[in-house]
Image: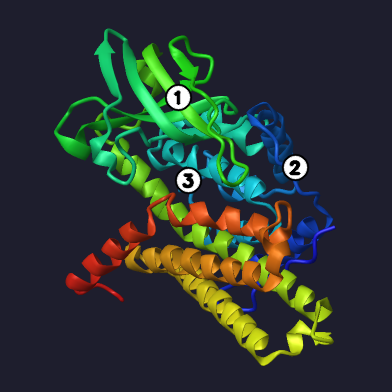
């Protein structure tokens, strides 16, 4: 049984968010954590988790109804969900997030035909989605993508390799960003919907990560798809990817806050019970000071995250600087909290399977994906130089 997650008491929420927080707290408390298994296990686990989240209504927060006049995402709600999921399980958080990331380009580009075909099954937890952007030689620099999509009559033919793709081998379909060549650099990229069983698409060897995560390689070898599977207009693939990441980047910080909260809670419990030199460790001033730093990091991160989410929901504009601060500040803070938790746990903290050892592994990748910490610093610095909000 997992200890109860509690929604943060902050002024950025309305009654609908507080009601969601209560449901999330109930779900986290009764949920079972997934086991760590290999890639063959992930497919069924992803489906089971997606179905459960659909039943509780959580997937509807990241996959809007395509028939809505102006579909949008409530970033505060998504961030609350991801904090609760990060508190519970990094794998569960990954399933939830990818269902949103790997469908958002459809409704953001108003691709109605494709949206009607793919969004419903993902929203109901019946299908698993993937988003294929990064490549062996292109990560943070999306404009360096080399995978090509060449027009051939009524089709496009894809050739190239995608690497570090979440849900590779577990997804039913992928949004793939490839070079169509309308212009140099990022302006020559387009996005496509590719079903997992399309001839010419294969999955590379399994990649084992430091934290349980379905991730791998996709290989496109003369992979032919209908031209109608293009998402949006030619040359808009980069824009679709960036708009998607801009929506979900704040919630990365929220998941990190959830992990930090659980690490802090586990540490407090451990320090209350562990004896050292005849007294509980929690009575030692140095231990109390260390836990105070952990609590401060966690609460500061929470404020950064929900301020950015509130700005996204209630103020016009992209607020990229606030979003970058939330992602950077929260993931770096969570890493410090996890590291201190391991230190205070002692030998148990580095034993495989202990909660803080697991959190330490889960937090570390968050400082890299969806824009590494260094990239977030560049965004903030660029905004300052332009006179933007800091």
In the rendered view, tell whether residue 203 sits above or below residue 134. Answer: above
Q: Which residue is mark 3?
A: 69
C-alpha span from label 2 to label 1:
25 Å
Q: Label 2 near label 3: C-beta < 8 Å?
A: no
Residue 378 drawn at (x, y percent): 27, 62
C-alpha span from label 1 to label 3:
35 Å
C-alpha span from label 3 to label 2:
41 Å
For residue 35, the mark is 2
Q: Which residue is mark 1?
A: 218
Q: Residue at x 52, y 25 (%)?
A: 173
Compared across the picture, whether 126 is left or right of 139 comes to right
Q: Nearer the viewer, residue 245 or 161?
A: 161
Name the image quarter holding the C terminus. Answer: bottom left
Q: How many C-alpha atoms fall within 10 Å of the one at disc 2: few (<14), some, or many (≥20)?
A: few
Q: Earlier in the sequence, mark 2 or mark 1?
A: 2
Which of discs 3 and 2 lies nearer the camera? The answer is 2
Give residue 291's quadrant in the image: bottom right
Q: How many C-alpha atoms fall within 10 Å of the one at disc 3: few (<14), some, or many (≥20)?
A: few
């Amino acid at each position: 049984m997992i200890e109860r997650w509690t929604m943060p008491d902050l002024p950025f929420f309305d009654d609908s968010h507080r009601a969601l927080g209560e449901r999330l707290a109930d779900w986290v408390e009764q949920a079972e954590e997934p086991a760590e298994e290999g890639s063959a296990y992930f497919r069924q686990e992803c489906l089971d988790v997606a179905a459960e989240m659909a039943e509780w209504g959580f997937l509807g927060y990241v996959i809007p109804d395509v028939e809505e006049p102006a579909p949008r995402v409530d970033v505060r709600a998504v961030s609350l969900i991801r904090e609760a999921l990060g508190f519970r399980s990094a794998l569960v958080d990954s399933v939830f997030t990818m269902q949103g990331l790997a469908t958002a380009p459809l409704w953001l580009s108003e691709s109605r035909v494709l949206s009607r075909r793919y969004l419903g099954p993902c929203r109901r937890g019946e299908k698993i989605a993937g988003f294929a952007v990064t490549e062996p030689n292109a990560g943070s620099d999306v404009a360096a993508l080399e995978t090509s999509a060449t027009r051939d009559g009524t089709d496009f033919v894809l050739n190239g390799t995608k690497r570090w793709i979440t849900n590779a081998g577990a997804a039913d379909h992928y949004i793939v960003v490839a070079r169509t060549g309308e212009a140099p650099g990022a302006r020559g990229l387009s996005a496509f919907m590719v079903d997992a069983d399309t001839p010419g698409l294969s999955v590379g060897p399994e990649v084992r990560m430091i934290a349980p995560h379905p991730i791998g390689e996709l290989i496109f070898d003369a992979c032919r798809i209908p031209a109608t599977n293009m998402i949006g207009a030619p040359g808009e693939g980069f824009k679709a990817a960036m708009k998607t990441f801009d929506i979900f980047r704040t919630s990365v910080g929220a998941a990190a806050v959830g992990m930090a909260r659980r690490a802090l809670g586990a540490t407090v419990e451990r320090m209350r019970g562990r004896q050292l030199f005849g007294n509980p460790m929690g009575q030692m001033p140095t231990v109390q000071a260390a836990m105070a730093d952990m609590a401060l990091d966690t609460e500061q991160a929470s404020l950064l995250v929900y301020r950015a989410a509130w700005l996204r929901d209630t103020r016009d504009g992209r607020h990229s600087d606030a979003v970058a601060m939330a992602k950077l500040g929260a993931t770096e803070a969570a890493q410090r909290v996890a590291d201190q938790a391991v230190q205070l746990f002692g030998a148990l903290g580095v034993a495989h399977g202990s909660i803080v050892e697991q959190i330490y592994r889960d937090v570390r990748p968050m400082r890299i994906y969806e824009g590494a910490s260094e990239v977030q610093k560049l965004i903030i610095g660029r905004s300052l130089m332009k006179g933007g909000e800091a």
